[in-house]
Amino acid sequence: MKPKRTKNHRGFLLPLLFLFSTLPCLSAQTRDYWLKTERKGTGFAFEHITVTKLPDGNLRYDCDQHIKTDVAGLNPQDITLKGSYIVTSDLKPLSIDYRMKFQVREKSVIGTCEKNVLALTITDGEGQIEKREIPVEDVYFDVVVSDLIFRNAGKKNFHLKTFNPLDIKVDEEKVTITRADEKEVEATVANSSTAKFRFDLNGQVKEIIYVELNGRAYLTDAKDAQNITYLNTADSITLMVKSQRSFPNVFKVSRARIQVQWEKIPFEEFKFEDNRQKVAERKESGGESEVILEMMKPSPPPGTLQAPITDPQWASYLEEDDYIKPRDPAIQKQAAAIVGDEKNAVVIVQKILQWVNTNVVADFIAETLTGPEVLQKRRGKCSEYAILFASLVRAAGIPTRIALGEAYSSGTWIGHMWDEVWLGEWTAVDAGAGIFVSGPAHLKFIDSPTVAGTQGLRWKLADNLRIEILDFEEETGTTGLATGISGRTYSNKTYSCKISAPDETWTLKEETKSGVLILTMSSKEAGAQFALVFFAVPPGTSPKTILQGRLNAISKMVKDFKLLEESEANIAGNKAPFAAFSQSEKSGTTIVNQNALVIDGVNAYLFAFITDQDRFEQLRPQFRKILAAFEIVK
């Protein structure tokens, strides 16, 4: 996500950064004031603004922003944005010195304006320098938007063009004056989200309401403004929704009906249908809307289309936008290296999917990177995977569009971005998983040739989305297994496996926690606990990558984490990564957690054996015995 003045997303671009306002209005006197931003009572950011009238009559705006975000509860990070802007007395741009620092993105933007052209020098955190010129006739720095609104309050409705230094581009905002009387001025500013400003009669912003995001910024003192904490976005700000019903294994579902509900968004803003999902029913009443989507597995693409695809009807799906950069030299060079002499469009898509999935590391960063930046940094969330994939595939001459909706994982839906490619029909692919999308694992709400084109709907759905699985059918197997416990043996039909406890002193229990199926075994006599966690993964998922991600997450959450060993085991004929780590409990006891992970197709099995540290070596054979009793039934 990005600061509000950027107007387009993280999607997922990470939403909280859109919460930022432009600056309050200016009188002839020097001003020094603070704005604090909060969502649902959590203050997570501030802006410190000073505005100075210079001896030559020009004005200098200095803005210092600090944002604290914990992305999906997995990655606390601080973001700083600092800018110094010189403008004329009528707010026309003269010069800019802007610096940003995110988790993996760092940049400075320095420039001067002459003859309606802003000449910029852009330097990234690794010292790379780029020169760029931006036409700025009738364009203002985004930092003076509030002044412009107040000065034009008599116009009622108007548009403003502003230079956005974060993305080095010109944006446009629609302004509506909703109140102007002897008490105050109110205005609504609309782009991909809606902000409502309140000014006093001196032009000072008193409050800004961020309508879709349940957030606000308000005028306050320095002490209150700087008292901020990390905003955990693991709620509806990232479109996270839990269903009461869950899929045992979403990748084995052949058909499903899913109910989606929302309020005050016209049905026409959605683009639900694709080669996997159709609208079966639709209801609208009193501002409340509902659709029931029929989800199915599509047929594989025919594989006869040759690249490049030059049909002019797909021209907009081959162009550049603010993030997707198929004409960038580094992108073109990498695309050529991946594709080689291949002309078959399906094979090209498969090659690029595999390359992006293998070469980009998943990282819940707050910033949204361009295609060339992802290629350089080799990390990011779903939006970075989708943006780099779109850049490379368009460079190879294959039309691509951005899809935004929900991804399913263990009973929870979470906002997600992926791609669709034209292969004779629009076909969904997910570079983050390295797969052609099939079935209800991805629930699409909208698609667009551009990233920004998905963001208006995305913001309107924050705190405004309900999803429920109505019914589904699973692919039938021939294992003859029935799910349940018999004696000291447990079998599972969906995950095609069975496992036995070491002896009769162990107690077995099947349970579901937060949509995740878990088999637990415990033995007071042995003094140990065991858990087998079942979950679904896309085809081709690396067990080593999954286990390493688990270790990285645990190391940030527990006290005194220490990795004791890493190796490889053979479990039920599969090579499985193995790791053991210790951690301190609240009681002061140190425990050891031994983990192993098996992936068979779309079935994943996580084995965890927990003992006190002083009994670790003594009980290690018990863990081996349990692993040896695990069987995948074909």
Image (spheres, rainbow, N blue to C red):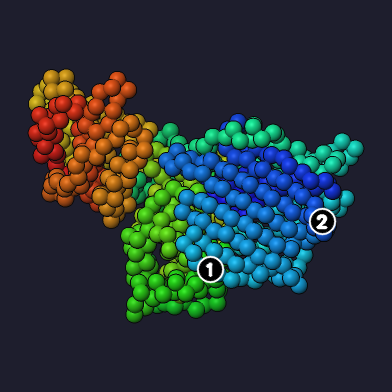
Q: Position of residue 512 (x, y in %)?
A: 32, 31
Residue drawn at the location 46% of the way across and 54% of the way down: 104
Residue annotated with mark 2 = 55
Rendering coords of residue 337 (x, y %): 35, 74
Examine the image and state in which quarter residue 429 appears. bottom left
Q: Residue at x 59, y 50 (%)?
A: 81
Q: Disc 1 residue type? A: Ile
**SS for callout 2:** loop
The residue nearer to you, when weighing 566 against 191, is 566
**Residue 631 to residue 59: above or below:** above
Residue 469 in sight in this render: no
Specify whether 435 is left or right of 569. right
In the rendered view, tell whether residue 350 sits above or below residue 463.
below
What is the spatial separation of the Cα atoms under label 1 and label 2, in whole angstroms? 33 Å
Instruction: Say which element carries label 1.
Output: strand
Query: Mark 1 sits on what residue?
Result: 129
The disc label shown at residue 540, or none: none
Residue 519 relative to residue 53: left or right? left
